[in-house]
Image (cartoon, rainbow, N blue to C red):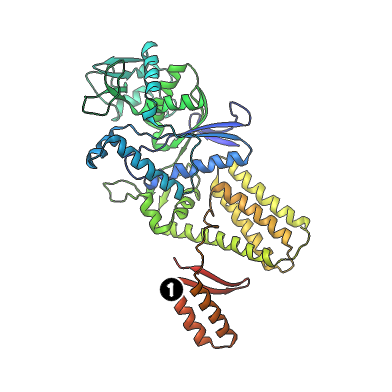
Amino acid sequence: MKIYNTLTGQKEDFKPIEEGKAGIYVCGPTVYNFIHIGNARPICVFDVFRRYLEFKGYDVTFIQNYTDVNDKIIKQAKLENSTPEETALKYIHEYETDAKGLNVRPADVHPKVSLYMDKIIDMIQTLVDNGYAYESNGDVYYRTRKFEGYGKLSKQSLDDLIAGARVEVSDIKEDPLDFALWKSAGEDEQHWDSPWGKGRPGWHIECSAMAKDCLGDTIDIHCGGKDLVFPHHENEIAQSEAATGKNFANYWMHNGHINIDNKKMSKSAGNFFLTRDAAAKYGYETIRYLMIQAHYRMPMNYTAELLDSCKASLERLYNCRENLDKAIEKAVNGSIAVEVEEIFEKRKSQFITAMDDDLNTADGLTAIFELVRDLNKMISDPETSKEQLVKGAELFDCLTGVLGILYNRNEKEEIPGEILELVQKRKEARKAKDFALADKIRDEITAMGYTVKETRQGTEITKSN
């Protein structure tokens, strides 16, 4: 498999540290509010990445942290008349609700900053001891200029950074480029004891400490949104490599931004959408499909039209799978023709080729829809054997499972008895050629929130959206 490595700016063959294993660290949410649409993209994309590596036979260790110590959490806690700890826990639970709705599997470990304070302090102390950090008025700062490789991930030089507006100027820092590892705090603020006084860690050092503890000094793959390349991931590299003397991560993967109707998403622009709200309108699975229908590195445009298209694509997949089940029930036993075996192998290879090319889920979906076309032809042929349909269904389930879609297939609501009685009466009316009565019953069924239609496989009853 080839992965586009942000660090080198090119696609590279994935070669894990330990053969057959893959360690992945994904920057998780800062839990101070509900996640928005932009947050949903990396958690869906890298969930697919994890699933695909497992499909390829890798033993994957997947780490995603919770940033539960942060100034944003403290600010939100005041607004909610709560404590930072209670606020963080509340939004961890809300995140888990959204992640489950999106069919994102829990990480093997979800480290929390609040439980890593000793290890964070130890790493900061190591940086102080080796001259990469210094204490000033109870704060601790990292000496950015001392790390020779600073800027290698974001491809920015120190001169570029100085010229930019993203540098904090402070009288207590040796250099404007230096960034905080530890921030002093008063008695009435959330704080922990440290060798430099009461305070709490800076954002960047938290991930360095958690990644090192969970995956070792060097990790296979570090993932996150493109917005984290600088300064967060750049600072993680500087801290971690200065503390350990080793390469921090061999591969860096970053997903592209999401725009709203071709405009950057922001609260001030009034085009800011929470995942929860979007899912209430379109369904969580439609949101997940949206996140994987384009290549993960490309910017994506969030529009109502695109969501409607995603929903229609899912319906086409569900219809194929449901028709397969019905056809399997009626099909007779037989053999699988060589040419059919070849078709299935071709679609599987097509899917793997796409996904091996830097997780190209867009082309992976193309392979699945071409499989759908093949299967629909087989379903319509009364000579198709049960074995052939079963094998097609198994491949269909395997490939859609790698993408984490069609996960609501076995959770359909049971059709109420009164609806089934009306459907039977409608069937009898049609048999008696009383089409006026049949139409009247159909309208009654529709008014009760269900749709009934005749298909080649029989009468189909679905709950209306």
Q: Residue 189, position in %: x, y?
A: 23, 28
Residue flagged by tag 1: what amino acid is it? Met
Q: Residue 206, position in %: x, y?
A: 38, 27
Q: Residue 74, position in %: x, y?
A: 26, 35
Q: Residue at x 54, y 40 (%)?
A: 49
Give neighbour class at mark 1: few <14, some 14-19, many 20+ (Cα, 10 Å): few
**Front residue of 400 and 264:** 400
Q: Residue 186, position in %: x, y?
A: 21, 24
Q: Residue at x 35, y 29 (%)?
A: 203
Quarter assignment of residue 65: top left
Q: How many callouts does the rendering have?
A: 1
Q: Is residue 156 visible?
A: no
Quarter assignment of residue 387: bottom right
Quadrant holding the C terminus: bottom left
Figure check: 417 above or below 182: below
Figure check: 194 above or below 310: above
**Front residue of 19 and 111:** 111
**Front residue of 393 and 194:** 194
Figure check: 31 above or below 364: above
Q: Secondary structure at mark 1?
A: loop
**Front residue of 195 and 277:** 195
Q: Is residue 73 visible?
A: yes
Quarter assignment of residue 375: bottom right
Per the image, the residue denoted by label 1 is: 448
Figure check: 93 above or below 261: above
User: Residue 164 vs residue 45: left or right?
Assistant: left
Quadrant holding the N terminus: top right
